[in-house]
Amino acid sequence: MNHHHFGHGGFIGTRREFLTRYGMGMGALALPSVTSGSISPLLPKKPEFSGKAKAVIHLFMNGGPSQVDTFDPKPELTKYDGKKIPLELKTERPTGVAMKSPFAFKKHGESGIEISEIFPNIAKSADELCVIRSMHADVPNHEPSLLLMNCGDSRLSRPSVGSWVTYGLGTENQNLPGFVSMCPGGLPISRTQNWQSGFLPAAYQGTYVDTKTVDPKKLIEHVTPKHLARHRQREQLDFLRALNEKHALQREQDSELEARLQSFELAYRMQLEATDAFDTTLEPRYIREMYGENLQGRQMLIARRLVERGVRFVQVWNGAGQPWDNHDDLEQNHRRLARESDQAIGALLADLKQRGLLDETIVIWGGEFGRTPVVEMPKPGTNAGRVNGRDHNHYGFTTWLAGGGVKGGHIHGATDDFGFAAVENKVHVHDFHATLLHLLGFDHENLTYRYSGRDFRLTDVHGKIVEDILA
């Protein structure tokens, strides 16, 4: 791309037609801002070519789940359990002998994909899964690996994947944010950098929602005004807009100011739709019971309700901190975490398929890296002195996708016999991002943004499409 977008020819319909259609009429109230030249950067745009997917739900297993205990079974670990394995391992911390998986694996579906016993509900959708067993990253540390997976760079401040996607495609609902990041109980490691817009216009930054809160009116802070009638609020907003636009005339192309103008209008329109989208009690009881009426069940159900309403990119975090970072008590902790999320993820996959949404929605499951096949040795500050956990491992780990144009019932790549390093059909995070953009209708080398004298892209100067996983 030579400039910022694929051209205004990508906009669908006129602004007034679109706001009336997708804003249920309320968006048309914001039209005075159009007459002064302010065009929402989140209006839907056509992709570079016809992609299979229109939306993404990224299920982020924060902390790094163990591949050999989830989706990459290794019989050799059982054979060598308690013994030194015949591999030269480079690990972040001192490690010891092989540690077999405490979980049984079983083949599922017509595809026969082997899945750990801790995911019985996800296993019901085995034939929808495209399991990449050969992922690899750059370093075995949380912060840089989180940023690499979420932003395409482990060191520098770069736009997140969700920001790139909404920059390229806009969003189909002007009453809701185009990019939502749900993380219960606070912020993850690297905090808001995980959904930052970086040097892209600020309008593309992810909207953080703490889903630990149940009441939808409290879930989104100040979504309902307490002291103003709706028409008075509209008058106040119009006056504020007039002042801001007069201010903006002297500061052309200030993305943060433009984002602030747009956010006022979005916040006003969200009052109609946001509480509805986040209110899972509006779903039939059998649907709520299918997902599970717990925190993860609510998150997954909200994710479905958001993409159903046209939100482009939804990220669902499995808790603040690093819950999957099990340096000790791995069996107990992995089993608990899987029990908390398995029903909800299984329900999400089945529900999306039943509603005809899975074909156009990419569901991603995975963390920032994997874990070692050998046990981590006790060391102050890293574990509780128990020799029953695994250390960080970026050399080989598993991520799976479903829907949105990927091959279902398919396994791509492999790690070595012990599950330490990717050795067959290796997929770097840059390759993963290139493939994701391709599924959404973009050549990753063409979706660029000029900043500081050069054209930047999500994959920087790297990345190749993993053709083998495309349906």
Image (cartoon, helix red, strand yellow):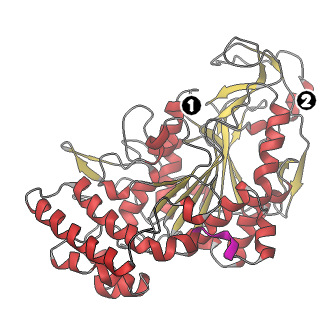
Residue at 34 percent of width and 45 percent of height? 198
**Viewer-nearest of discs 2 and 1:** 1
Query: Is 279 colored magenta in this rendering?
Result: yes
Can you say whether 433 is above or below 176 in the image? above
Can you say whether 266 is above or below 16 in the image? above
Which residue is at the far left? Answer: 250
Magenta segment boundaries in residue numbering:
278-282
Choose top left, top right, bottom left or bottom right for residue 360. Answer: bottom right
Q: CA distance from mark 2 to mark 1?
A: 28 Å
Q: Quadrant of the N terminus?
A: bottom left
Residue at 41 percent of width and 81 percent of height? 23
Give residue 142's mark. Answer: 1
Q: Secondary structure at mark 2?
A: helix
Can you say whether 278 is above or below 208 in the image? below
Q: Amino acid at mark 2?
A: Thr
Can you say whether 390 is above or below 72 in the image? above
Pick whichever of labels 2 and 1 is earlier in the sequence: 2
